[in-house]
Image: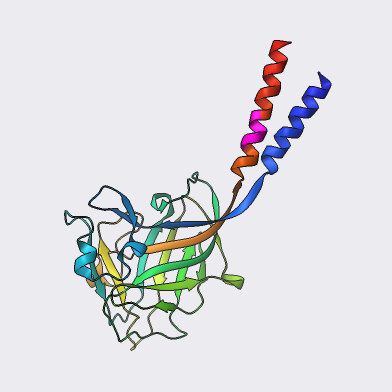
Amino acid sequence: MKKTIITLLTLAGMTMAAEEVKPITLGSWFTDSQGNKQMTVDAVVGLSKENASALDGDGGFTADGAEGITVNTIFTIDTASLYSTTTLQKGQVLDVVSIVLSSKQNTNNYADGNYRTLSITLNGTTYTSNPIQFSRTSGYGTMTYTFTGDNAFSFTLGDTLTASLNAIDGTAHTAYGTFKGQTGVSNFSAPSNLTDWQAAVKINATATIPEPTTATLSLLALAGLAARRRRR
């Protein structure tokens, strides 16, 4: 009996200790014409606003873009509502690597520079990204913001993040994609002329989660031991 208890405790410890750090991607999303969830940032890359708007077929999802913005652009991200291809439990802690937004389609006059950053406020603390990195295409592109050093941060799945794209007084902000009909992001609260629109957001992060194979084997072993005890 004593040996059995020790073995069970050992296997339980193996199950709890079997963890690994995995890359996780979450994003704002819409439902396409086939009824599938699509992460907006990835779905619209390389498309014109007309072709992007046609992805869902019924007009519920609409794409456009903004440029010449001279005030900070502010919106919130509801992390509990973001789509992830990995099954996550609410309360999972994620370490942010980068946040990616859609850049405006068919724009050649990007006003990029070291002052182009994204700030995230969480629980009263603000984290500011490294300077913007562009990926330009003939349609929608991407704007990537990384968070490192003192600005590296984590969030708990279910948190609301307040995002602010900075603008420099007298200098137009980088052009970005605007959308309607997404889940996971609020409408812009600023600028005032865009309050019916939303940003497209993708969060690249890492999470420490149980390693499925080892955990499953340990649970099976526990079940086997319990079955043998019952037969005795």
Name above or below for residue 12 compared with residue 34. above
Name above or below for residue 192 compared with residue 24. below
Q: Residue at x 25, y 73 (%)?
A: 65
Of the 4 image quadrants, the one containing the C terminus is top right
Q: Residue at x 35, y 80 (%)?
A: 174
Q: Residue at x 26, y 53 (%)?
A: 32
Instruction: Determine if residue 141 is in view.
Output: yes
Q: Is residue 91 magenta?
A: no
Is 213 positioned to the left or the right of 203 in the image? right
Which image quadrant for residue 115? bottom left
Instruction: Determine if residue 196 is in view.
Output: no
- Count all numbered tags in the image, as a single digit: 0
Is 226 positioned to the left or the right of 121 in the image? right
Which image quadrant for residue 220? top right
Q: What is the chief secondary structure element of the magenta stretch?
A: helix
Q: Position of residue 106 (x, y in %)?
A: 26, 79
Q: Position of residue 35 (x, y in %)?
A: 26, 47
Nearer to us in this view, 23 or 88: 23
Nearer to us in this view, 71 or 28: 28
Please report the bounds of the magenta region as a residue range.
216-220
